[in-house]
Image (cartoon, grey):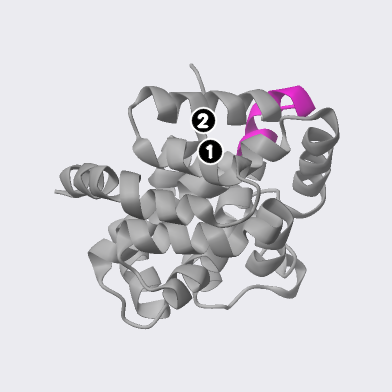
Amino acid sequence: MSLNLMDMLQGNMSDALIDQLSNQIGGADRQQTAKATEGIMTTLMGALAKNASTPEGASSLFNALEKDHDGGILNDLSGLIGGNVRPEQQRAANGMGILKHLLGGKQNGAIDMISQMSGLDSGKTGNLMSMLAPIIMGTLGQTKRQQGLDVGGIASLLTNSVATQRGSNNPTMDLVTRMLDADGDGSIVDDVASKGLGILSRFLGRKRR
């Protein structure tokens, strides 16, 4: 059976968890939160795959999973979202640190892109991204541990997961790839607004109905 990180991530996103996320970021519209959550998961999965596309990046990711992200953070997602984590899990729960490492200078561009896709304002999108980043790393770390994946296995899982999203005609993945490959000038956000937003909104609207 081919592993798909997106399927595993979506399996963790229960209706109750989406409701909690909506409340935690300030009583956001639930549908907008759900759309933004999907966009964030796709974006961070794409960033992980890009980082793992070189031997150095794959090794760095593998070491981070070994050290800080074994999946234990997933045992209490409600506590994680509410900011109640055990001291030994502080590094695993450090969403801002994870985002800085994965997205670097592209973080603001990613937030703006997801905000336009979902309708959620950028401040709430940024907070939501920080909450979801530990879940994504924890899910990847849990899969690594359960499946006994080595460096190559992690890289292959991410590559295959991205390819599956592209094959499923998910337009978010193409926009994410363009954003990650851009030179950092933010022009991809304009592209989302002028070219991709209408298509993407219709796609997400159909999917969530």
Depth check, mark 2 against mark 1: the one in front is: 1
The image shows residue 139 at horizontal and vertical percentages of 57, 46
Q: Is residue 74 left or right of residue 155?
A: left
User: How packed is label 1: few (under 14 Cα within 10 Å), some, or many (20 or more)?
Assistant: some
Q: Secondary structure at mark 1?
A: helix
Element class at badge 2:
helix
Q: What kind of secondary structure does the magenta stretch mostly adopt?
A: helix
Task: Report the residue marked by disc 1.
Answer: 177
> Does any portion of residue 13 appear in the rendered image?
no
Name the image quarter holding residue 157.
top right
- Span shown in magenta: 143-153
Position of residue 189 measured from the top left corner of the image (x, y, whole percent): 46, 56
The residue where tag 2 is placed is 162
**Vertical order, 74 against 176 (above or below):** below
Q: Nearer the viewer, residue 118 or 59?
A: 118
Q: Nearer the viewer, residue 53 or 68?
A: 53
Tell me, yes or no, whether the two marked residues, 2 and 1, touch with CB atoms within 8 Å. yes
**Neighbourhood count class around disc 2 (C-alpha, 10 Å): few under 14, some 14–19, many 20 upward:** many
- In the picture as drawn, the residue positioned furthest to the top comes out as 1
**141 part of magenta stretch:** no
Tell which residue pokes out farthest to the left in this image. Answer: 209
| Residue 83 horizontal/vertical position (percent) | 56, 78
Measuring 24% from the left and 50% from the top, which residue is drawn there? 201
Type of amino acid under label 1: Thr
- Taking the image as shown, residue 57 lies to the left or right of residue 171, namely right
Q: Does the magenta portion include 147?
A: yes
**30 and 148: which one is in front?**
30
Tell me what residue is drawn at x 38 percent, y 73 percent.
121
